[in-house]
Image (tube, rainbow, N blue to C red):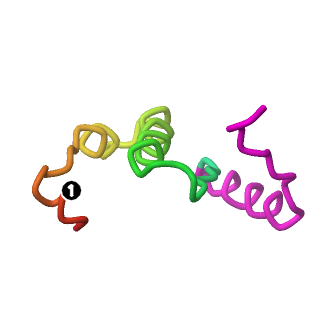
C-alpha cells in the first residue's frame, strides 16, 4: 500500500456542508493538496459538464501558456 493516500473519514462538518451544497444544486467536491492542478480542474469541469453547465466546455478546453507555466504564473 505504499504510495496510497489514506482516505479521510468525513467529519460532521463535511457532511453538513455536502448536504447544503446538494440542496442548492452544487455537486460537493473534495480537492486535496496532493492532487495536481490539472486533476483538480478535470474533476470540476467533469462535474460541471455532467450538470450541463454552459462554461464546462470552455474551461475544459483551456491549456496553460507554456511560458507562463514555466514562470509559475
Residue that numbered label 1 is attached to: 69
| Rendered view: 29 above or below 48 | below
Q: Position of residue 4 (x, y in %)?
A: 71, 37
| Dot 1 alpha-carbon crowd within 10 angstroms: few under 14, some 14 to 19, many 20 or more | few
User: Looking at the image, how many numbered discs can be counted on the residues?
Assistant: 1
The verdict on residue 33 being magenta is no
- Left or right of residue 1, residue 69 in this image: left
Q: Position of residue 16 (x, y in %)?
A: 82, 63
Where is residue 32, by image quadrant?
bottom right
- Left or right of residue 39, residue 18 in this image: right
Residue pictured at 66% horizontal, 58% vertical: 21
Residue pictured at 45% horizontal, 42% vertical: 39
| Rendered view: 41 above or below 2 | below
- Left or right of residue 37, residue 71 in this image: left
**What secondary structure is marked by label 1?**
helix
Task: State the extent of the magenta-drawn residues as a range.
Answer: 1-26
Between residue 66 and residue 18, name the one nearer to us. 66
Quadrant for the N terminus in the image: top right
Residue pictured at 83% horizontal, 57% vertical: 15
Q: Position of residue 49 (x, y in %)?
A: 42, 35
Where is residue 71, by image quadrant?
bottom left
Residue most extreme to the front:
2
| Rendered view: 73 above or below 2 | below
Between residue 2 and residue 13, name the one nearer to us. 2
The verdict on residue 21 being magenta is yes
Residue pictured at 22% horizontal, 68% vertical: 73
Amino acid at each position: 500500500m505504499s504510495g496510497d493516500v489514506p482516505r479521510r473519514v468525513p467529519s460532521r462538518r463535511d457532511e453538513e456542508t455536502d448536504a447544503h451544497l446538494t440542496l442548492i444544486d452544487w455537486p460537493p467536491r473534495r480537492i486535496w493538496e496532493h492532487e495536481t492542478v490539472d486533476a483538480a480542474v478535470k474533476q470540476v469541469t467533469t462535474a460541471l459538464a455532467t450538470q450541463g453547465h454552459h462554461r464546462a466546455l470552455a474551461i475544459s478546453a483551456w491549456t496553460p501558456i507554456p511560458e507562463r507555466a514555466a514562470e509559475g504564473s
